[in-house]
């Protein structure tokens, strides 16, 4: 049986390439998501804001709401929210650009993984990734 961490890693591998592609082409991307549905299939999930250039927070809230609803209906076993942000890596005192992927799994596993990056000549170069425990905001723990 596959563990929650292994499913999280599988989901990251499936949804990360879009962020890298968007960064290489446009230097940024809007928040988007992905999930593993209850059949084990990985699905990509986007959100459309109220304008052509919606605030990131609006899209994040829309995605989180959709994830919580899908989790409540037991449609998802894991969700991932992908954002472009500034973060201070461990051991450094300066913020850098990073892809943030917030993973929540119904087996009480929640983690936020950061992939620091730089863009040069249309190519994305990643630094050392790091992670911390997530907030567990998607799945209600008493329903497991």
Image (cartoon, grey):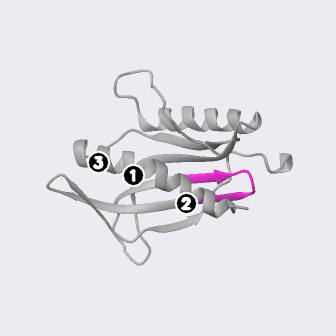
User: Which element type, helix, strand or loop, lies under badge 3?
Assistant: helix
Q: Where does the image place residue 51, in percent across and percent down from the top left? A: 38, 21
In the image, taking residue 39 as reference, residue 88 lies left or right, namely left
Query: Disc 3 marks which residue?
Result: 23
Q: Is residue 48 placed above or below 114 in the rendered structure?
A: above
In the image, taking residue 41 as reference, residue 92 lies left or right, namely left
Which residue is at a point 38% across and 72% down the rendered structure image?
128
Magenta stretch bounds: 102-111
Q: Where does the image place residue 17, in percent across and percent down from the top left? A: 38, 50
CA gap, disc 2 and disc 3: 21 Å
In the image, taking residue 97 as reference, residue 44 lies left or right, namely right
At label 3, counting other C-alpha atoms closer than 10 Å, the crowd grade (few under 14, some 14-19, many 20 or more) is many
Q: Is residue 110 magenta?
A: yes
Q: Is residue 133 placed above or below 80 in the rendered structure?
A: below
CA gap, disc 3 and disc 1: 12 Å
Q: Quarter of the image holding residue 7?
A: bottom right
Which residue is at a point 41% across and 78% down the rendered structure image?
91
- Disc nearest the viewer among 2 and 3: 2
Query: Disc 1 marks which residue?
Result: 85
Magenta stretch secondary structure, dominant:
strand
Which residue is at a point 80% across and 51% down the rendered structure image?
141
Q: Earlier in the sequence, mark 3 or mark 1?
A: 3
Q: Earlier in the sequence, mark 1 or mark 2?
A: 2
In the image, taking residue 28 as reference, residue 36 lies left or right, namely right
Q: Where does the image place residue 69, in percent across and percent down from the top left? A: 70, 33
For the residues labelled 3 and 1, say whether their Cβ atoms are less than 8 Å apart: no
User: Which element type, helix, strand or loop, lies under badge 2?
Assistant: helix
User: Which element type, helix, strand or loop, lies under badge 1?
Assistant: strand
Q: Where does the image place residue 84, in percent across and percent down from the top left? A: 39, 49
- Disc nearest the viewer among 3 and 1: 3
Q: Earlier in the sequence, mark 2 or mark 3?
A: 2
Q: Which mark is residue 9?
A: 2
């Amino acid at each position: 049986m596959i563990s929650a961490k292994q499913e999280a890693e599988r989901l990251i591998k499936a949804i990360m390439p879009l962020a890298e592609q968007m960064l290489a082409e446009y230097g940024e991307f809007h928040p988007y998501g992905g999930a593993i549905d209850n059949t084990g299939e990985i699905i990509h999930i986007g959100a459309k804001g109220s304008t052509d250039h919606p605030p990131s927070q609006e899209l994040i809230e829309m995605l989180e709401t959709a994830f919580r609803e899908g989790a409540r209906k037991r449609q998802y076993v894991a969700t991932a929210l992908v954002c472009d942000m500034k973060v201070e890596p461990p051991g450094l005192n300066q913020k850098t650009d990073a892809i943030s992927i917030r993973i929540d799994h119904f087996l009480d596993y929640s983690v936020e993984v950061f992939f620091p990056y730089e863009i040069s000549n249309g190519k994305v170069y990643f630094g050392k990734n790091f992670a911390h425990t997530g907030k567990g905001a998607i799945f209600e723990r008493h329903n497991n």
